[in-house]
Image: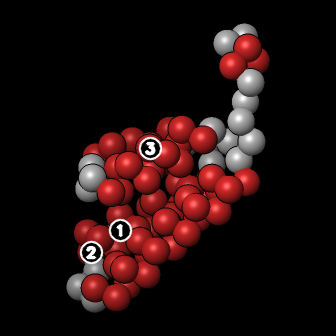
C-alpha cells in the first residue's frame, strides 16, 4: 500500500479536484480505495439525494482514515531499487 495514494485522495476530495481523483482511482493498487472513490463520484454526479452523497463521502473518508492508521512506511532505500 502506498501512503501517498491516501494522502492524494484526501487532498483531492478536500479540494474538489474530481479529475485528479478519477486518475488516482484508476492508478491506485488499492482496490478498496478505488471502489470507494468510484462510489462517491458516481453518487456526486448522479444522485439527487444529498444524504446518499454525504454517506458515500463519509465512507470514503473513513476508509482513508482507516488505511492511513494501518499503512506501514516503506524504507526510502528499498523504494529506490
* Residue at (71% x, 47% y) in the render: 71
Q: Furthest-top residue in view?
A: 81
Q: Which residue is mark 1?
A: 42
Q: Quadrant of residue 42?
A: bottom left
Question: Could you tell me how far apart the alpha carbons at marks 2 and 1 are, in whole angstroms?
Answer: 6 Å
Q: Helix or strand or loop: what does disc 2 sit on?
A: helix
Packing grade of label 1 (10 A; few <14, some 14-19, many >=20) is: few
* Residue at (33% x, 43% y) in the render: 20
Tag 2 near tag 1, CB within 8 Å: yes
Residue 19 coordinates in the image, percent (x, y): 28, 46
Mark closest to the chain's N terminus, 1 or 3:
3
Question: Could you tell me how far apart the alpha carbons at marks 3 and 2 are, in whole angstroms?
Answer: 24 Å
Q: Which residue is mark 3?
A: 8
* Residue at (26% x, 69% y) in the render: 45
Above or below for 62 versus 69: below
* Residue at (68% x, 42% y) in the render: 1
Residue 77 coordinates in the image, percent (x, y): 73, 14
Packing grade of label 3 (10 A; few <14, some 14-19, many >=20) is: some
Question: Could you tell me how far apart the alpha carbons at marks 1 and 3 are, in whole angstroms?
Answer: 19 Å
Above or below for 35 versus 28: below
Q: Identify the disc placed on residue 46.
A: 2
Is any atom of residue 27 visible in this view? yes
Q: How is the image coloured?
A: secondary structure
Amino acid at each position: 500500500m502506498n501512503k501517498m495514494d491516501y494522502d492524494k485522495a484526501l487532498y483531492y476530495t478536500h479540494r474538489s479536484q474530481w479529475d485528479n481523483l478519477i486518475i488516482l482511482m484508476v492508478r491506485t493498487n488499492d482496490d478498496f480505495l478505488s471502489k470507494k472513490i468510484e462510489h462517491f463520484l458516481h453518487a456526486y454526479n448522479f444522485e439527487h439525494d444529498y444524504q446518499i452523497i454525504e454517506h458515500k463521502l463519509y465512507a470514503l473518508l473513513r476508509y482513508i482514515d482507516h488505511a492511513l492508521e494501518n499503512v506501514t512506511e516503506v524504507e526510502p532505500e528499498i523504494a529506490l531499487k
